[in-house]
Image: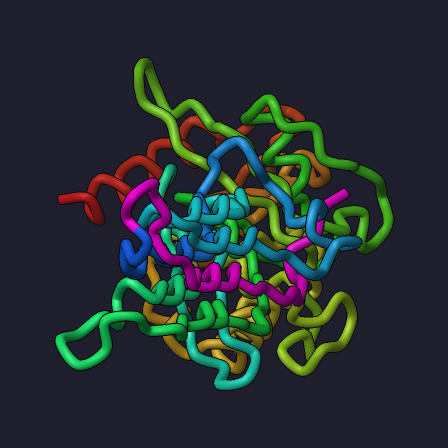
Amino acid sequence: MFLDYVEIEVEAGCGGHGCVSFHTEKFVPKGGPDGGDGGRGGDIRVIGDHHLTTLLDYRYKRKYRARAGQPGSGGLKTGKSGEHTVLRLPVGTIIRDRDTDQIIIDLDEPNSEFVLARGGKGGHGNAYYKSPTNQAPRKAQDGRQGDKLRLALELKLLADVGLVGLPNAGKSTILAALSAARPNIADYPFTTLRPKLGIVKLREFKSCVMADIPGLIEGSAEGKGLGHQFLRHIQRTGLLIYVVDINELDISETVKTLQEELGKFDPALLKRPSLITITKSDTISESDLKEVSKHYPDDYIFISAVAGQGTKTFLQRIEQELDRQRS
């Protein structure tokens, strides 16, 4: 099951208490204070794991704590530090503070590690308080509390190319035909209920990651249809591909609708490099296809993923655009 948003609470470990102790030894009746410091509390840490693709593990368990530090002991022994709690999250996860809505960390690199909540410091033992005027202090310090945070985890898929279009426009068919991904495909709207990723081979030794985003409708940015719950996933894509069914009554109007919805969600998406692809070209006759193509710019790509028509040009254009970005 795919899950791209959860809310959790984390609490780092408390520091261990300092110890009140006095050295005792035969023939040394007043050995002086030897109480050790408490150990430091464990941290809450996160690691970006490229093997994970969902936040499902955090759906049912919402609270995470690290171990407290152990108290100090006599003989100037410092208590053992508490164990850290490590949360492994998918690469592409953004972590926000729910109280301030500020981004704490964006795990956009594999194996990136970050300390979310720091454990409390251990308290000083009575040996720390020994002074010329107080040779036998009988006080020790309590360990400090660890950090507590209320967090929102938001996953944004990392992909080179994002397919956007109306429901049943043919996005899943494109991904299935060009990669090993197997999204659900059927002749009715909203077949795709969660984003899908696939590795698409552009040519020998060269490939890209393509994302199939669930279909948009007019009003998606306000939450209609499947809403904007999946629009966040196209914010990381380097190239947007508007996918339009050739059987739409007004292809240009459909493209405009898609662009308007993306602009309402995030105006920066309209500045993102993009291609326009007309799908299902095998559903009309060859003469009709030539007639239709006359009415649209040369940079529109007509394809049929099922019949393999135009896919070579499609992949070449993707490669050109990605190369342009990388250069």
Q: Is residue 127 left or right of residue 86?
A: left
Q: Position of residue 189 (x, y in %)?
A: 82, 54
Foreground pick, 244 / 221: 221
Q: Which image quadrant for residue 159?
A: top left
Q: How is the image coloured?
A: rainbow
Residue 140 visible at all: yes
Specify the segment rendered in magenta.
1-28
Q: State the image coordinates of residue 250 (x, y, percent, origin top left).
A: 64, 67
Q: Nearer the viewer, residue 291 or 220?
A: 220
Q: Residue furthest front?
A: 27
Q: Residue at x 86, y 49 (%)?
A: 188
Which secondary structure is most common in the magenta stretch? loop
- For image coordinates 53% across by 31% down, the residue present is 51
* Magenta stretch encompasses residue 13: yes
Q: Position of residue 260 (x, y in %)?
A: 53, 78
Residue 205 falls in which quadrant of the image? Answer: top left
Q: Position of residue 59 (x, y in %)?
A: 75, 54
The answer to whether residue 55 is magenta is: no
Is 232 positioned to the left or the right of 193 in the image? left
Q: Quadrant of the C terminus?
A: top left
The residue depicted at 34 percent of the width and 43 percent of the height is 25
The answer to whether residue 300 of the structure is visible from this angle is no
Taking 100 as reference, is 138 left or right? Answer: left
**Viewer-nearest residue: 124 or 265:** 124
Residue most extreme to the top: 204
- Residue farthest along the bottom direction in this orientation: 100
Name the residue at 67% across, 62% down. 6
- Number of marks present in the image shown: 0
